[in-house]
Image (cartoon, rainbow, N blue to C red):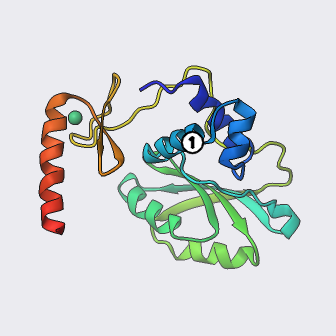
């Protein structure tokens, strides 16, 4: 589905300042507060806005950050990614190909303690790390061009919706579906699910 230019402007404003209030955004963009609120709710519903996080300068806390490059067997990658993502120190984690994992790691106390933890993970075949000495640029990952297409999976068949989704409202929330057949199936599934709860 295509986002309109106002959606994109709202996202840009939030990327600059995640704490901007709906009122402030409305004033800046020349639209009403309820419109901003409605649009942000939709963007959250679509899981496009992941969180409104605060970016704290780690260096000011005398924390060090390392870039970690891990090698493992392709068959161990999923297990290892799960283990690593559970570690507090790992701040960003990427599977690169079948056998490589990159991570950005922040060390608040003791680097050796962290490396010892890595040593205990049998799936790690080899690793190297580099300490970051200068952070020159650190931006939110999403770039916002003026034409933004958002890929939403169909709530029923889970396939990515290529055209405009069919949007239905149930209990005040929007649900996105790929076609009218999925709409019927979904309504039925939703009705049965509610019956079980009630
Ligand atoms: Zn579908």
Q: Which residue is mark 1?
A: 34
Which residue is more in the foreground, 83 or 189?
189
Query: Which of the 4 quarters of the picture holds residue 66?
Result: bottom right
- Where residue 165 sits in the image (x, y, percent)? 32, 29
Q: How many numbered discs sit on the rendered protein?
A: 1
The x, y position of residue 150, in whole percent, is: 46, 31
19 versus 84 height, above or below = above
- SS type, badge 1: helix
Q: Is mark 1 within 8 Å of ligand 1?
A: no
Give the residue drawn at x 43%, y 43%.
46
What residue lies at 56% left-to-right and 56% top-to-bottom?
Answer: 70
For residue 124, side relative to residue 32 (left or right):
left
Give the quarter the ligand 1 occupies. top left
Residue at the image point whose x is 35% and y is 49% from the top: 172
Q: Would you say residue 41 is visible in this rendering?
A: yes
> Residue 77: where, in percent of width, then height?
42, 56
Task: Report the front residue among 49 and 100.
Answer: 49
Is residue 15 visible in the rendered image? The answer is no
Residue 142 at x, y = what percent? 61, 37
- Tag 1: Cα neighbours inside 10 Å, few (<14), some, or many (≥20)? few
């Amino acid at each position: 589905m295509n986002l309109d230019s106002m959606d994109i402007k709202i996202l840009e404003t939030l990327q600059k300042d995640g704490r901007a209030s709906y009122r402030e955004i409305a004033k800046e963009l020349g639209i009403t507060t309820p419109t901003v609120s409605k649009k942000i709710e939709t963007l959250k519903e679509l899981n496009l806005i992941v969180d409104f996080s605060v970016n704290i300068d780690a260096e000011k806390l005398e924390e060090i950050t390392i870039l970690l490059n891990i090698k493992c067997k392709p068959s161990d990658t999923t297990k290892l990614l799960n283990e690593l993502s559970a570690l507090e120190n790992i701040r960003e984690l990427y599977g690169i190909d079948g056998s490589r994992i990159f991570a950005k790691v922040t060390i608040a106390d003791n680097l050796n303690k962290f490396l010892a933890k890595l040593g205990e993970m049998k799936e790690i075949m080899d690793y190297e790390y580099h300490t970051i000495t200068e952070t020159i640029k650190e931006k939110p990952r999403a770039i916002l061009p003026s034409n933004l297409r958002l890929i939403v999976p169909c709530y029923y068949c889970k396939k990515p919706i290529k055209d405009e989704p069919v949007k239905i409202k149930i209990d005040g929330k929007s649900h996105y579906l790929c076609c009218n057949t999925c709409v019927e199936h979904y309504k039925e599934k939703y009705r049965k699910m509610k019956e079980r709860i009630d």
